[in-house]
Image (spheres, helix red, strand yellow):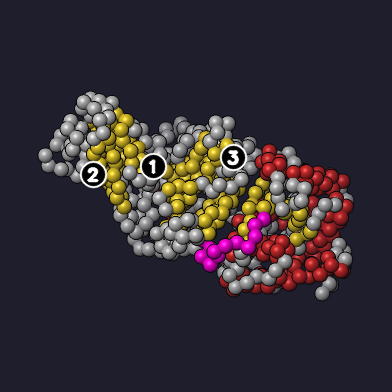
Amino acid sequence: MRKQKIKVTFVQYIIYKSNSSTMKRFGLFTTIATALLIVASNAFAQIPGIKTPDSIEFQSGTNVCVNTVISTAKESVTLHAKDAWFGVANRPSIAKRQKHTVRLWAEPNFTTKERTSSLVITTTDGKSHEIKVSQPPYLTSPTTHTAARLMLQKGASHTGEWEESGICSTHNGSGYFAVVPVHGKPLATGFDKGLTIASLDKGDYLLFVMPNGDIKAGALFDFGCTLNASDELSPTHFIFEYWDGSKWVAPQSERLRRTANGEPYSFYNKYFRSAHYTTFAESFRLEEAATECVKVRLRVVKGGQGVTNIAARSAYVGMQLIHYPHIRSMRDSHRILFVGNSFTYYFGTPFMLKEIAASQGHAIDAVVSIKGGQEFAEHLLLERTIEAIERGGYDYAFLQDSSPNQAYYADTKRADIRSASRQINQLTLKHSPKCRIIYEHTWACPYQNYRGFGSYERLDALLYEGVHLLAKEVGNVWGISPIGEGFRQGRMANLPLLYRDNRHQSREGAYMKSCINYLYLFGEPFDERVADCGINPQIAATIRRIATEVVAKARKAEKEGKTGEWKIWSNYQ
């Protein structure tokens, strides 16, 4: 019998009807492409009576599912994929004398080489047949990157790519994000305050890939992501895994928890009516060398049919993967809690601090609860914040109150601000008795007429005096990170530290904050390996110089007992 190769072709289509309000709400209008394999009457059959195609070819760069028709005779058969980059979605077994459409899924091939494998068909009496499976490469030339950051603007070319094919690249091609539907169901993708995916189910996963053809065994990486559950039906539990050699591996950290059914997961992503995004960070080390790319995934452990949002818009870091090629081992490790609001999450300052520290040989195990507009009193009512604090075991905690509260306290001595500060300190120390609490002295900005105080000079003074007064009266504060002074000095040096809203930190401002927090935490100068975190190297060097001077000044003033009064501080040398 003549062997016949059947090549897959693909057709995209719309999955929601015009009256589908949920899909319209989240801008979901495309699906993962699908395909049909038609089996000819003379299709190759190595096992008598069983009809299969000779070969199957996936597309390179769409999150594809393909259908192929398989007919059985006197024997039942089982099907399995020989490699982990594709699999059988709907029919792992077929009874005898049946004809079924088998649905296959595959990851996009984010490499420069075609990959091949086999779909193995095994009968109940042990006979087997392999169908060749292939997929051409998505990339045309090899690239090498050490950092991939998924941060998007609506309307940019990569968001159109996402809406059309379910794949999104970072702005410089340093990374690629895709959804892999292992159940073979159509997944709707869109853009609404980030990348949106509907109908994720258990086992489906979010894939993030960084091209790099020179990853040696033992290489160290940091991963970070920001997700949101957009409705009550969204998947709730995910496990983080990385590809190491020939298998997916989950870091065996103490934060790996278990569902009621005993399944391990890394974090939960719960819907809150007032959005409280999940911020997750994890470090890992490859045991084996990687060729062409490094890939990680977030696999759904407990699924749902709702909408998941990857917060990758504007100042949010949707996902990032950082490689430290010059770091072979860490000098120490610290478990750190971050509680704050948009003055912490803009441009991912916990991720930045983790990256800077790792580049200097310090590992940070970061647990983060950040929600826009929140002050301490509101954090004490948030499920995610309480859960993070109650995990315990922290060496340090960076606590960032609503920025104007420090100025308000200096101006009016509001008892509610003092009470909430005391409560969050006490709760943190209850679950982490040895934790060193650090308050963040935030920065002045012209927003709302300088928070109602009329000038930079007045607001600078009140923020400084307020945070020191609070720390003194509340107690149990190990230190105050002088971020506000760094912004003041940066402002005088004409550094672009504020975002376009003249309120939040820009990417450079986030770097200033992270550098100051690093220096305050570790008390040592930067070496030549220090991470720029994607900042222009010349600007980054200027920021580090100012941060070094500011922290040295703050530590000296603390040692000499000359903190708390603006008149003394502003003239202190």
Residue 109 vertical position relative to residue 213 in the rendered view, above or below: above
Direction left: furthest residue: 1
In what element is the residue under mark 1? loop
In depth, the one of 405 and 8 nearer the eye is 8
In what element is the residue under mark 2? strand
Between disc 3 and disc 1, the foreground one is 3
Tell which circle, 3 or 1, labels the residue nearer the N-terminal end.
Answer: 1
At label 3, which amino acid type do we have?
Answer: Arg
Q: Give the CA separation, mark 3 to mark 1.
A: 31 Å
How dense is the environment of label 1, judged by Cα within 10 Å: few (below 14), some, or many (20 and up)?
A: many
How dense is the environment of label 3, judged by Cα within 10 Å: few (below 14), some, or many (20 and up)?
A: some
Rendering coords of residue 24 (x, y %): 49, 37
- Residue range in magenta is 323-334
Asked whether 417 falls inside the magenta stretch, the response is no
Instruction: Determine if residue 513 is in view.
Output: yes
- Residue, disc 3: 257
Tell which circle, 3 or 2, labels the residue nearer the N-terminal end.
Answer: 2
At label 2, which amino acid type do we have?
Answer: Ser
In what element is the residue under mark 3? strand
- Residue, disc 1: 32
